[in-house]
Image (cartoon, rainbow, N blue to C red):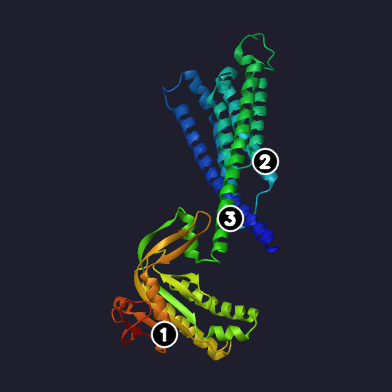
C-alpha cells in the first residue's frame, strides 16, 4: 500500500516537469515569432515612411520624423525577444523552471509594448487617431499569447496590465478627460473605461481557457496513467498482449477465426512432489518455473493463455498475427528445455522434466463468458490435439512432440524424428507425430 502514493507522486512530478518543458519550448518559439513580427513591422513602417505617394505629405513627414525612434523601439523589442529565447533554451537544457517573478515581469514588459506604440503614435497621428489606431488591438494579441503558458494568474495579470495601461494612456492623451469638448465620445472616460474593462475581461477569459486546457491535459494524462496501470495489473493475470487488445477493442462476446499454433506444457510428476512438500514450497517452485517460461513465450511472440495447475497453454498467432508462429513456438519450447536443464544442473530446483505438445490449425479466438465476467480464449480441435500430443510425450519418452501440420510448416528446417502414426486419446484417427527432443 505504501508504494502507491510514492509512484503517484513520482508520476505527478514527471508530468509537471514534462508539461513545463513543453510550455518553455512553446515560449521559445513564441519569442522567435515575435522577434520576426517586430522585424516585419519595422520594415512596414519604413516602407510607409519612405515610399513616395503612399501617404499624404504631412503624414509622411511625421512618419519620417519618428522613424529613428520607432526603429530603436523595434530593435529593442527584437533584442529582448531574442535574449528571452536564449534564456528559455538555457533553462530547458538545465532542466530548470523559470521563476514566477520572471514570468510576470515578462508579461508586464510585453504587454507594455502596445502602450509604448500608442504613445509614439500620438506624436505623428495626434491623440484622437492614436486612440483609434490598430495598436490598441495588439493588447488582445498578447493576451491570447498568454494562454500558451497555461497559467490562470499570468493570463489575468496580462489582462489587468493591458486594461490599466490603456486607461492611463487614454487619460493622458485626452488631458485627464477634462476637456471643453466633453460631449465627444473619444474624450469620454466611460468609453475608455469600457474599452479597458474589455481588455481585463479578455484576460480573465484567457485565464479560464488556460486553466481548462491545463485541466484537460491533466485528465488525459491521468487517464493514460490509469490505463497503463490497468495494463500492468491486468498483464499480471493474462498476457500483456491480451490485456492491450482487450483494452483497445470493444469488449463483446464472440470471436474471430485464426490460424494459430498451440503449445501445451506439463510438469512431470508434479503430483508426487506436491504431496510431500508444504504448500508454500510448492507455490515457490511453480513460480520459479513459470517465471522464466512465461518470459520465453513472450520473447518468442507468444502468449500464455491459461494456467493448468502444473502446466499451461500458450498460443502463437493470436491475438496478434504471426506468420512464423510455428517456428516461434518450437524455438520457445527448445529455449524452455535449455533453461530448465541449466536450473537442474545448478541444483536451483528439484529434478524437473516437462512434456510439450505443439499443433497448428484454425481456432476461434475471442471473448467468452457473460456480461459481468469475460475471458479471452482459444477454441477448436487444434487445442485438443496439442493437449493430446503433450500427454503422448509420457508414452514415447519425449520432451517435445509436434504434429504433421507444424512439421510441414517448418519446411524441414527442424531435425525431428518421425514416430509415424500414433493413436491419440480423443482423436478419431491416428496422427503422424514427430519427436523434437
Q: Which mark is residue 105?
A: 2
* Relative to 123, residue 145 above or below: below
Q: For this rendering, which residue is in front, 244 or 67?
A: 244
Between label 2 and label 3, give the one nearer the viewer: 3
Give the number of callouts.
Answer: 3
Report the quarter where the N terminus lies.
bottom right
Disc 2 from disc 1: Cα separation: 79 Å
Residue located beneath label 3 in the image: 226
Q: Which mark is residue 142?
A: none
Q: For this rendering, which residue is in front, 103 or 124?
A: 103
Q: For this rendering, which residue is in front, 209 or 46?
A: 209
Label 3 packing within 10 angstroms: few (<14), some (14-19), many (20+): few
Q: Secondary structure at mark 1?
A: helix
Disc 1 from disc 3: Cα separation: 44 Å
Residue at x 64%, y 39% (from the top left corner): 152
* Relative to 401, residue 19 above or below: above
Left or right: 199 as drawn, with respect to 398 = right
Residue at x 46%, y 62% (from the top left corner): 376
Q: For this rendering, which residue is in front, 328 or 389?
A: 389
Amino acid at each position: 500500500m505504501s508504494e502507491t502514493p510514492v509512484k503517484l507522486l513520482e508520476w505527478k512530478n514527471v508530468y509537471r516537469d514534462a508539461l513545463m518543458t513543453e510550455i518553455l519550448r512553446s515560449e521559445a518559439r513564441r519569442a522567435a515569432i515575435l522577434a520576426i513580427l517586430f522585424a516585419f513591422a519595422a520594415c512596414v513602417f519604413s516602407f510607409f515612411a519612405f515610399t513616395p505617394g503612399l501617404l499624404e505629405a504631412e503624414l509622411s513627414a511625421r512618419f519620417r520624423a519618428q522613424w529613428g525612434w520607432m526603429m530603436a523601439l523595434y530593435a529593442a523589442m527584437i533584442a529582448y525577444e531574442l535574449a528571452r529565447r536564449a534564456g528559455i533554451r538555457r533553462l530547458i537544457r538545465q532542466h530548470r523552471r523559470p521563476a514566477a517573478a520572471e514570468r510576470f515581469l515578462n508579461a508586464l514588459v510585453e504587454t507594455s509594448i502596445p502602450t509604448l506604440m500608442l504613445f509614439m503614435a500620438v506624436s505623428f497621428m495626434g491623440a484622437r487617431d492614436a486612440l483609434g489606431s490598430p495598436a490598441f488591438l495588439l493588447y488582445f494579441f498578447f493576451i491570447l499569447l498568454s494562454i500558451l503558458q497555461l497559467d490562470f494568474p499570468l493570463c489575468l495579470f496580462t489582462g489587468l496590465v493591458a486594461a490599466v495601461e490603456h486607461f492611463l494612456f487614454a487619460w493622458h492623451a485626452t488631458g485627464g478627460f477634462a476637456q471643453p469638448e466633453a460631449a465627444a465620445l473619444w474624450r469620454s472616460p466611460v468609453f475608455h473605461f469600457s474599452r479597458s474593462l474589455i481588455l481585463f475581461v479578455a484576460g480573465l477569459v484567457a485565464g479560464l481557457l488556460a486553466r481548462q486546457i491545463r485541466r484537460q491535459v491533466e485528465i488525459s494524462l491521468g487517464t493514460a496513467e490509469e490505463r497503463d496501470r490497468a495494463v500492468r495489473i491486468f498483464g499480471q493475470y493474462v498476457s500483456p498482449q491480451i490485456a492491450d487488445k482487450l483494452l483497445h477493442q470493444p469488449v463483446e462476446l464472440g470471436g474471430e477465426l485464426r490460424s494459430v499454433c498451440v503449445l501445451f506444457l506439463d510438469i512431470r510428476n508434479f503430483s508426487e512432489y506436491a504431496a510431500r512438500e508444504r504448500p508454500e514450497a510448492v507455490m515457490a517452485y511453480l513460480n520459479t518455473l513459470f517465471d522464466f517460461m512465461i518470459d520465453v513465450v513472450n520473447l518468442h511472440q507468444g502468449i500464455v493463455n491459461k494456467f493448468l495447475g502444473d502446466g499451461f497453454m500458450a498460443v502463437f498467432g493470436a491475438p496478434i498475427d504471426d506468420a512464423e508462429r510455428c517456428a516461434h513456438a518450437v524455438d520457445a519450447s527448445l529455449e524452455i528445455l535449455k533453461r530448465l536443464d541449466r536450473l537442474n544442473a545448478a541444483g536451483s530446483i528439484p529434478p524437473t522434466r516437462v512434456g510439450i505438445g505443439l499443433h497448428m490449425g484454425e481456432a476461434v479466438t475471442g471473448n467468452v463468458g457473460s456480461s459481468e465476467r469475460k475471458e479471452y480464449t482459444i477454441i477448436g480441435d487444434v487445442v485438443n490435439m496439442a493437449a493430446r500430443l503433450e500427454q503422448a510425450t509420457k508414452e514415447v519418452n519425449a520432451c517435445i512432440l509436434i504434429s504433421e501440420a507444424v512439421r510441414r510448416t517448418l519446411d524441414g528446417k527442424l531435425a525431428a524424428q518421425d514416430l509415424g502414426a500414433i493413436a491419440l486419446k480423443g482423436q478419431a484417427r491416428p496422427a503422424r507425430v514427430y519427436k523434437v527432443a
